[in-house]
Image (tube, rainbow, N blue to C red):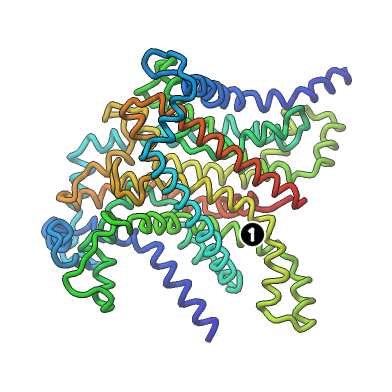
Amino acid sequence: MLRRRRGAGKRAWLCFLAPSLLGVLVFVCLPFLDVVRRSFTTAVTGRWTGFSNYRAVFENEAFRLAVWNTFRFTAVCLPLLVGLGLFVAVQLSRLSNNQRFKTMFLFPMAVPAAAIVLVWKMVFSSGGFLNLFLNRMGILADGVQPDYMASGAAFWVLVFSYVWKNLGYTVVLWLAGLSAVPDSILEAARVDGASQWKCFWRITLPNLKGSLYTITVLSFLNSFKVFREAYLVAGSYPDKSMYLLQHLFNNWFVNLDLDKMAAAAVCVGMVLFMAILLLQRLWDRED
Amino acid sequence: MRRFMRYLILAALGILFIAPVFLLVSGSFMSRWELGEYLGPLESGEGFLRWAWFPMYPTFSHYARLLFETPQFFTVFWNSMKIAVCSVGGQLLLAVPAAWAFAVYRFPFRRLLFTLYVALMLLPFQVTMLSSYLVLNQLNLVNTHWAVILPTACSTYPVFLIYRGFSSIPGALLQAARIDGAGEWRIFWKIGLPLASNGILSAVVLGFLEYWSLIEQPLAFLEEQSLWPLSLYLPEISLSQAGYSFAASVITLIPPAFVFLIGQDYLEKGIAASGLKE
């Protein structure tokens, strides 16, 4: 009797994991293998073509543009969001009651992309609030009204909407990290005469390293979702400066360029997987 | 003085963050003429738009039109509801036990599988779009709501969120329960679930907010407009029907805002827990 139960205990993990694993295998992993196979064949006849799809993808101008934009977007947004999030979190942690502020910063998460499109149009088009504001401040001369969505500035609109949407999430993560920094050490340092800045730089920051991994991973995850706003505001072919990989994949899908899509999906998947392994390696070294 | 400045900066930033909501709400109560006058410059490209935080002649006409004269809107609303609720429900059924398995048991390839899960959670939809489409096509599910629900229900993100909650449960507690003769299922049900409820509820809230505004999946897998969720229907309304669009936006905003305000506590605790190293 006892032995049987122990045996069941050993296999219990399988019962808990199986449904999810099955779903992941059926809907993602196995079809992805099929996509890998397809990336080496032609779309219509299914003939083996070796690496020619990959060559076509890398020679594709739109692909290069999209990769560059996506990379640039990530490189600008991640540090900006993580940094700004930390700044706001530190300010909030010094308030005695910050609940109301947290609600304010988190609320954009609840605002659906579709509902915000109208607002972005009102703010960023040529007759919009931003130009109105700049004009009243005397920064823009009368008659000069750039349309932000139709110029290189579209990229920054995207950055703004990403930060707007995700700052609250990041702030909450940082606040959790900040509250885990032991007060006793800070107290001791202060008694020893360390300045507030020094306390932050030498004690708080090193203690926050652990939070950084999750914050980076989750901010990265959310950075892909900015496509929603981009797509809804500017459609399938937006200004060049905000043409992301997501747009490209979407357009290939609509145009049934499945062979190119397969090859590009394999490339992007591999790059991301490598990035994750690297991040995890760094994370493990912390332990 | 410093305190005051801090308050001022935070308040300014906070107001900037929620201003869009007030914009939508005030716009939804404005008459067509008022809106036409305010938003005219957007269409013509000359001059600037104007705005009033309180409508001159408040009206419910847009809401009335939406709720009583547009049966289509109800269909779309329920499509969204169905997709969001079913996706979140499916996620719970799959992700909670999976997170438990990762957190509590030691089994072969555990680390590798968990890395795979984290990697899959980070893959943007576009990368797996083709593979999902191929399967859904095989299963004859394209152009049904299941095409959206099933793949999202298999998302691995909630596993990551809930995992931390489970792994903070001390192993000694579980061992004690085992010695007292509790089965694995009972331990999961009576000890695991209650102790990780914050993480689970935060996954529910996040999931709902996320799936309420799905764009990519329905765009790729639903051809028929009658199956579309609100998030696709809303942008179709042109600026010339601004009042209608404002009212529809506000109604779209209500369910997630409601879920957010009820669940904010869990959401915060869950997010916070997911960020801490054990």
Q: Looking at the image, can residue B215 be seen?
A: no
Q: Is residue B265 above or below residue A87?
A: above
Q: Is residue A115 above or below residue A167?
A: above
- In front here: B117 or B245? B117
Residue found 36% across the figure and 26% down from its top: A257
In the image, B172: left or right of B161?
right
Q: Residue at x 57, y 44 (%)?
A: B201
What amino acid does circle 1 point to? Ala
How many numbered circles does the render carry?
1
Residue A233 in view, yes or no: yes
Question: What residue is at 33 percent from the left and 28 percent from the top?
Answer: B222
User: Which picture quadrant has residue B97?
Assistant: top right
| Along the viewing direction, whichever of A72 and A90 lies nearer the viewer | A72
On the image, which quarter does residue A120 sit in? bottom left
Percent x, y of residue B192: 71, 38
- Residue A60 lies left or right of residue A187; in this view the side is left
Q: Position of residue B89 (x, y in %)?
A: 51, 33
Callout 1 crowding tier (Cα within 10 Å): few <14, some 14–19, many ≥20: many
**Parent chain of label 1:** A
> Where does residue B49 sit, x and y in percent of width and height?
19, 65
Q: Is residue B248 left or right of residue B168?
A: left
Q: Secondary structure at mark 1?
A: helix
Where, by quadrant of the figure, is residue B13 drawn? bottom left
Residue A190 higher or lower than B275, as above or below: below
x, y percentage for residue B35? 16, 59
For image coordinates 84% across by 29% down, the residue present is: B181
In this picture, residue B83 sits left or right of residue B46: right
| Residue designated by label 1 | A176
